[in-house]
Image (spheres, rainbow, N blue to C red):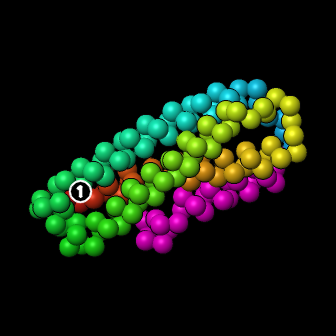
Amino acid sequence: MTGKIEKWYPLVTGFVLTSCYLYFLRSYRLSNSLKDLFSAATTLSGIAIGFLATAESILFTIDQTRTIKRLKGAGVYKKLINYFTDAIKWSFVLATLSFVGLVIDFTNPQPWHYIVLSFWLFCFVTAGLSCYRVIDVFASLLRSLN
């Protein structure tokens, strides 16, 4: 994947899918199980934050290994750390919005509900793809080092 695509595809995909939701699906009635979705997203985000923060801290502790020196020499280490940090930040935003979504009453439809849900959808897609990007880049780096 090229550098620009790799850098921007979580945000662009989040924006495109949110735009599709706003254009095609905003008039549909929201599901009664939306609270379950927010609860699951809160849990999943917390797990992602813990996993990513642990993996990033391990990278910092093995700073003087041959592998990390090779990553730094190739100019990839900083990019990987930035991707880790982005994924953690988006997961925090998603966890916060999901928690807020738990206290909003979506059973009584309001005109602003679709705006809240579209912002949540953007964060959900962006956080998920940011986590995927970290895993994908990290795995390809590990494969290339063998």
Q: Give the answer, above or below, for where 15 lies relative to 102.
A: below
Q: Is residue 143 left or right of residue 83?
A: left
Q: Position of residue 1 (x, y in %)?
A: 43, 65
For residue 15, what is the image quadrant? bottom right
Q: Is residue 15 magenta?
A: yes
Q: Is residue 82 above or below residue 17?
A: below
Q: Is residue 82 visible?
A: yes
Q: Is residue 25 visible?
A: no
128 on left or right of 38? left
Indicate the secondary structure of the residue bearing disc 1. Answer: helix
As displayed, is residue 87 above or below residue 77?
A: above
Q: Foreground: 73 or 120?
A: 120
At horizontal 79% and vertical 33% (from top left) the residue drawn is 106
Q: Is 88 part of what is drawn in magenta?
A: no
What amino acid is found at the position of numbered circle 1 in the picture? Phe
Q: How many marks?
A: 1
The quadrant of the image that shows the C terminus is bottom left
Residue at 87% in and 40% down: 110
Residue beneath label 1, please? 60
Query: Magenta: predominant secondary structure element?
Result: helix
Q: Residues within 10 Å of mark 1 (few under 14, many from 20)?
A: few
Measured as percent of width and height from the top left, residue 91 is found at: 50, 47
Residue at 86% x, 31% y is 108
Closer to the camera, 141 or 108? 108
Residue 112 in the image, given as x and y percentages of width and height:
83, 47
> Which region of the structure is painted magenta?
1-26
